Image (spheres, rainbow, N blue to C red):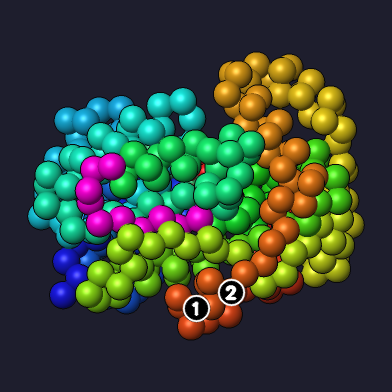
């Protein structure tokens, strides 16, 4: 018996997919949503839903109540380590037996990349509580092309990044969820104390991504490589806070240097499946780019 699994960030890209896959497998899942209205879709499917806000610890007890495991989706930023420590400690005290954290590629080796450093601080904070943990460190999501750049692609046929011709071993969010479900449901704490860096099976530049999207959708889609200075000017002009400027600046520098390019087979080892290739992702989501 797995017991109830709480999925935080349930309305987000990864959380939504984890809830969907757990429910499809007949596993008891509780979707923790930040914005109440975003829980309606789960309620309609008969999935237990609870409102939970990281900024309001008084909402955590209801989320943890009677549950066995947590899938934790947080956000890189200045308060991330404190939140992670407090949330994991509250989970441990509530009797949660396993805490699976959505971390990020590079957490263990790329402190120059702000998001990776912030996730490592969050991981360490969770570990310090003594709760049984698993860290999932996926590389860049294929779905970013829809969630972040989809509007620009639909409107103009172009998307803009300052990542030069750096390659990325993109992973499909559906595969991140498969790995999450495996770590949350396999018996005997098989994945406790482990950290998994998850990549796709090929590294592609954004030029290659644009070429595949164009071929599959039949619409010309172009990647425009911005200079570092141009990208920073755009962030400044949009009024982004200092830490967000650091996020973009360090991510782009990491990407341009090929930091996101390594490919491994960890996903295959823990799930016994092959990751989705970018071309398949493009076929599955072709309508989102038109
Ligand atoms: N994108 C990538 O390529 C990538 C790659 C590797 C790792 N990651 C990591 O993945 C994580 C993001 O996952 P995602 O893409 O699934 O996120 P997402 O789509 O941005 O969704 C974020 C979720 O968190 C919820 N949330 C926001 N503020 C909250 C609060 N105060 N209390 C409780 N919940 C709150 C949101 O709910 P509302 O919408 O209701 O606010 C939403 O459900 C980040 O830690 C990121 O660093 C991302």
In percent of width and height, residue 63 lies at: 19, 46
Q: Tell me the residue at 38%/62% (across/down).
A: 194
Q: Which mark is residue 194?
A: none
Do residues under tags 1 and 2 come within 8 Å of each other at their CB atoms? yes
Please determine whether, in this image, residue 28 is positioned above or below residue 131: below
* Apparent side of residue 228 relative to residue 79 in the rendered image (left or right): right
Please determine whether, in this image, residue 155 is positioned above or below residue 142: above
Please determine whether, in this image, residue 114 is positioned above or below residue 181: above
Q: Tell me the residue at 30%/63% (across/down).
A: 192
The image quadrant that residue 218 belongs to is: bottom right
* Apparent side of residue 76 relative to residue 254 in the rendered image (left or right): left
Q: For numbered disc 1, what is the local secondary structure?
A: helix
Q: For numbered disc 2, what is the local secondary structure?
A: loop
Dot 2 surroundings within 10 Å: few (below 14), some, or many (20 or more)? some
What span is in magenta?
128-137
> Does the rendering let one see residue 210?
no
* Apparent side of residue 235 relative to residue 28 in the rendered image (left or right): right
Which quarter of the rendered picture does the N terminus lie within? Answer: bottom left
Mark 2: C-beta under 8 Å from nearest atom of ligand 1: no
> Does the rendering let one see residue 260?
yes
The image quadrant that residue 173 belongs to is: bottom right
Q: Which mark is residue 269?
A: 1
Q: Nearer the viewer, residue 83 or 216?
A: 83
Dot 1 surroundings within 10 Å: few (below 14), some, or many (20 or more)? few
Q: Nearer the viewer, residue 73 or 183?
A: 183
In percent of width and height, residue 148 lies at: 65, 43
Mark 1: C-beta under 8 Å from nearest atom of ligand 1: no
Q: Give the residue number, with chain letter if any, for mark 2.
A: 265
Which quarter of the rendered picture does the C terminus lie within? Answer: bottom right
In percent of width and height, residue 274 lies at: 58, 80
The total number of labels drawn is: 2
- Distance, label 1 to label 2, CA atoms, is 6 Å
């Amino acid at each position: 018996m797995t017991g109830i699994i709480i999925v935080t960030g349930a309305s987000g890209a990864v959380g939504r997919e984890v809830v969907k896959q757990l429910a499809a497998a007949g596993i008891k899942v509780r979707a923790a949503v930040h914005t109440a209205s975003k829980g309606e879709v789960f309620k309609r499917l008969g999935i237990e839903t609870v409102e939970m806000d990281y900024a309001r610890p008084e909402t955590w007890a209801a989320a943890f109540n009677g549950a066995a495991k947590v899938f934790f989706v947080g956000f890189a930023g200045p308060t991330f380590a404190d939140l992670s420590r407090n949330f994991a400690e509250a989970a441990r005290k509530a009797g949660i037996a396993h805490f699976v954290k959505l971390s990020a590629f590079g957490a263990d080796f790329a402190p120059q990349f702000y998001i990776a450093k912030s996730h490592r601080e969050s991981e360490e904070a969770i570990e310090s509580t003594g709760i049984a943990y698993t860290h999932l460190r996926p590389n860049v999501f294929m779905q970013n092309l829809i969630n972040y750049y989809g509007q620009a692609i639909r409107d103009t046929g172009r998307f803009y990044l300052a990542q030069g011709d750096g390659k990325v071993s993109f992973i499909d969010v559906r595969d991140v969820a498969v790995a999450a479900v495996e770590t949350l449901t396999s018996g005997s704490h098989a994945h406790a104390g482990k950290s998994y860096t998850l990549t796709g099976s090929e590294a592609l530049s954004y030029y290659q991504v644009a070429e595949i999207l164009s071929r599959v959708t039949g619409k010309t889609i172009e990647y425009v490589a911005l200079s570092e200075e141009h990208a920073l000017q755009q962030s400044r002009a949009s009024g982004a806070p200092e830490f967000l400027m650091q996020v973009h600046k360090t991510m782009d520098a990491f990407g341009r240097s090929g930091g996101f390019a390594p490919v491994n087979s960890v996903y295959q080892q823990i799930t016994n499946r092959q990751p989705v290739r970018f071309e398949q992702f493009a076929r599955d989501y072709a309508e989102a780019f038109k």
